[in-house]
Amino acid sequence: MSGQFRRVLFSKAVDQTLKEICIEIEKRYEIHFLEIGTDKDHVHFLVQSVHKMSATNLIMILKSITAKGKFKKHPEVKTKLLGGEFWTDGYFANTVSKYGGETSISRYVHDQGLE
């Protein structure tokens, strides 16, 4: 999605809620959040999961649960959105092995929003 359509949604409170929701997701699913990086209008996750879970299923879980949780705790966020949708239909997913690349990706995700 083009940056011109992005809305500033991530305040410190909304960011904290996202992290709390992710902790709850970890308890219910075989998913571990290695890093969560938010900026004012987007988020990056570095996630570890079991090999039997497809990227599509993983993303469906993340989008569904985080959107519902955010709207429940921060209903004001929904009023800022076009069509009331928190997540766009698209996403980018990539795999990282323990043998290379994870450190630089982890650093990139962690540093989101830091200035």
Image: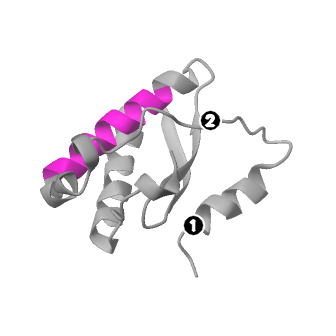
Counting from the top left corner in percent of width and height, residue 95 is at 71, 35
> Quarter holding the C terminus?
bottom right
Frontmost residue, 7 versus 9: 7
Question: How crowded is the residue under tag 2: few (<14 C-alpha within 10 Å), some, or many (20+)?
Answer: few
Give the spatial CA distance, label 1 vs label 2: 17 Å
Q: How is the image coloured?
A: one colour
Furthest residue to the front?
A: 4
Residue found 40% across the figure and 37% down from its top: 62
Looking at the image, residue 67 sits to the left or right of residue 57; the answer is left
Instruction: Describe the element under mark 1 as helix, strand or loop.
Output: loop
Q: Nearer the viewer, residue 110 or 75?
A: 75
Left or right: residue 52 compared with residue 19: right
From this viewpoint, which residue is outermost toward the right? 99
Q: Residue at x 17, y 55 (%)?
A: 79
Picture coordinates of residue 57, whole percent (x, y): 47, 22
Residue 63 lies within the magenta run: yes
Instruction: Tally the numbered discs.
Output: 2
Q: Which one is earlier in the sequence, the residue at label 1 or at label 2?
A: 2
Identify residue for label 2: 93
Queried whether the magenta region covers residue 44, the answer comes back as no
Whether residue 80 is situated above or below residue 94 in the rendered picture: below
**Amino acid marked by disc 2:** Ala
Label 1 Cα neighbours within 10 Å, binned few <14 / some 14-19 / many ≥20 = some
Residue at the image position 63 percent from the left and 22 percent from the top: 51
In this rendering, the answer to whether 13 lies above or below 31 is below
- What's drawn in magenta, residue-wise? 58-72
Question: Residue 109, percent across and down?
Answer: 61, 59
The secondary structure that most of the magenta stretch takes on is: helix
Question: Which residue is nearer to you in this view: 105 or 23?
Answer: 105
Instruction: Tell me, for residue 112, which label it has, or none.
Output: 1
Residue under the point 34% across and 55% down = 18
